[in-house]
Image (spheres, rainbow, N blue to C red):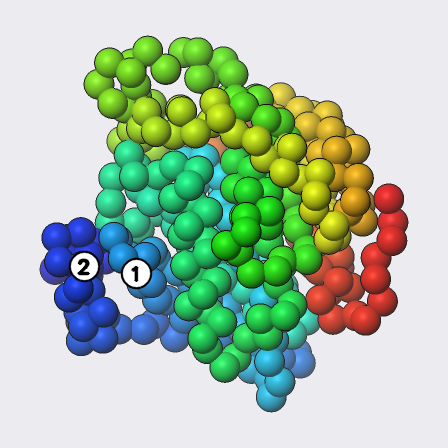
């Protein structure tokens, strides 16, 4: 029996039994990784949002005090470790600095037990809030020091998360190759291509080269994208932002990050444009394999870790614009 699929079945058909099933049927996988100064632990959890289980990996340093927390949000048709294991690598690097992190699969991706039709912008924000709520009930985390990292569409979700009234106070935002617009934005061509299909049957079936099976984008996702006001909402965000984008990104051009920096005028923003970087920061080659040259991905990770360490572990505010 696949415990993830079974928990998804229980959660959907018998929501009230989910908590009991999780306590009796699920095991936690602990993986220990040792650095030169800090021992880190990784825990796998299925966190219920009341409708389905959210597969989550929690990574924290073994230290006596509460750790600040970074939540990672993956992009379209991705999964919690991200392409080339970028989020897994980021989690390990953060742990060596004394920073905890969590990453999870959105509905219908990775190890999620439900169909992608359940994924919408609203569900993505709700799942992120559910994971944060779960984490804040644990003694290992400092709920006053939170950062969010969002990659591509995960960057859009991150913007919606940090400006949502139901979210905890999140003062630090990192975006990798993010879209930054109201309504469809960089999804305009995708929207126009698949909207009619979604209107006719309630979803559009979309094939991605790196996935065996197509994803079914719900009509609700299309409608929410059309009504998206994330850029307008970011005008009131007054925290700290690190925006990283590749100058050779043809999927989400770096000008989107420039636009977000201009619009979020109340924030303390740092923009990093990377020469030679495409949308996936050259972490994989043209065949889809891990690139032999990891110079650009390592630059991405090190820049992110240095910035997060400064924001989460230092008392000095960042004022770079």
Of callouts 1 and 2, the N-terminal one: 2
Q: Split into 4 quadrants, where in the image is the N terminus?
A: bottom left
Q: Which residue lies at the image location 34% right of the left edge and 72% below the top edge?
A: 29
Q: CA distance from mark 1 to mark 2?
A: 9 Å
Q: Position of residue 222 (x, y in %)?
A: 40, 24
Category of crowding for the residue at label 2, using alpha-carbon neighbours closer than 10 angstroms: few (below 14), some (14–19), many (at least 20):
some
Q: Which residue lies at the image location 80% right of the left edge and 49% below the top edge?
A: 268
Q: Nearer the viewer, residue 291 or 5?
A: 5
Q: Split into 4 quadrants, where in the image is the C terminus?
A: top right
- Taking 225 as reference, is 94 above or below it? below
- Are discs 1 and 2 less than 8 Å apart at CB? yes
Q: On the picture, is 276 further left or further right than 251?
A: right
Q: Nearer the viewer, residue 279 or 196?
A: 196
Q: Which residue lies at the image location 77% right of the left edge and 47% below the top edge?
A: 267
Q: Position of residue 27 (x, y in %)?
A: 26, 73
Number of the front mark, 1 or 2: 2
Q: On the picture, is 55 further left or further right than 274?
A: left
Q: Would you say residue 163 is visible in this rendering?
A: yes
Q: On the picture, is 204 further left or further right than 172?
A: left
- Of all residues shown, which one is farthest toward the bottom? 64
Q: Nearer the viewer, residue 303 or 22?
A: 22
When asked about the image quadrant of residue 171, the answer is: bottom right
Q: Position of residue 263 (x, y in %)?
A: 75, 33
| Residue at the spot of label 1 | 48
When asked about the image quadrant of residue 278, the answer is: top right
| Residue at the spot of label 2 | 15
């Amino acid at each position: 029996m696949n415990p993830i699929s079974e928990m998804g079945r229980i959660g959907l058909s018998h929501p009230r039994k989910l908590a009991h099933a999780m306590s009796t049927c699920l095991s936690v996988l602990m993986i220990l990784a040792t650095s030169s100064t800090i021992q880190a632990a990784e825990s796998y959890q299925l966190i219920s949002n009341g409708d389905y289980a959210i597969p989550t990996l929690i990574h924290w340093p073994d230290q006596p005090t509460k750790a600040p927390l970074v939540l990672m949000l993956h992009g379209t048709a991705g999964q919690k470790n991200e392409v080339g294991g970028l989020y897994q690598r980021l989690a390990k690097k953060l742990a060596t600095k004394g920073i905890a992190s969590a990453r999870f699969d959105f509905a219908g991706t990775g190890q999620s037990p439900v169909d992608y039709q359940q994924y919408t912008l609203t569900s993505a924000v709700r799942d992120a809030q559910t994971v944060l709520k779960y984490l804040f009930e644990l003694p290992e985390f400092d709920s006053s020091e939170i950062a969010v990292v969002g990659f591509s569409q995960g960057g859009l979700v991150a913007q919606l998360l940090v400006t949502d009234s139901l979210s905890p106070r999140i003062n630090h935002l990192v975006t990798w190759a993010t879209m930054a617009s109201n309504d469809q934005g960089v999804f305009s061509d995708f929207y126009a291509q698949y909207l009619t299909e979604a209107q006719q049957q309630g979803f559009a079936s979309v094939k991605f080269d790196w996935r065996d099976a197509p994803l079914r984008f719900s009509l609700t996702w299309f409608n929410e994208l059309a009504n998206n006001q994330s850029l307008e909402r970011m005008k009131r965000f007054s925290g700290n932002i690190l925006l990283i984008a590749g100058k050779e990104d043809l999927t989400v051009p770096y000008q989107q990050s420039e636009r977000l920096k201009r619009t979020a005028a109340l924030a303390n923003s740092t923009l990093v444009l990377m020469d030679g970087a495409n949308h996936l920061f050259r972490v994989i080659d043209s065949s889809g394999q891990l690139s032999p040259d990891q110079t650009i991905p390592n630059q991405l990770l090190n820049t992110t870790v240095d910035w997060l360490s400064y924001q989460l572990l230092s008392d000095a505010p960042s004022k770079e614009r």
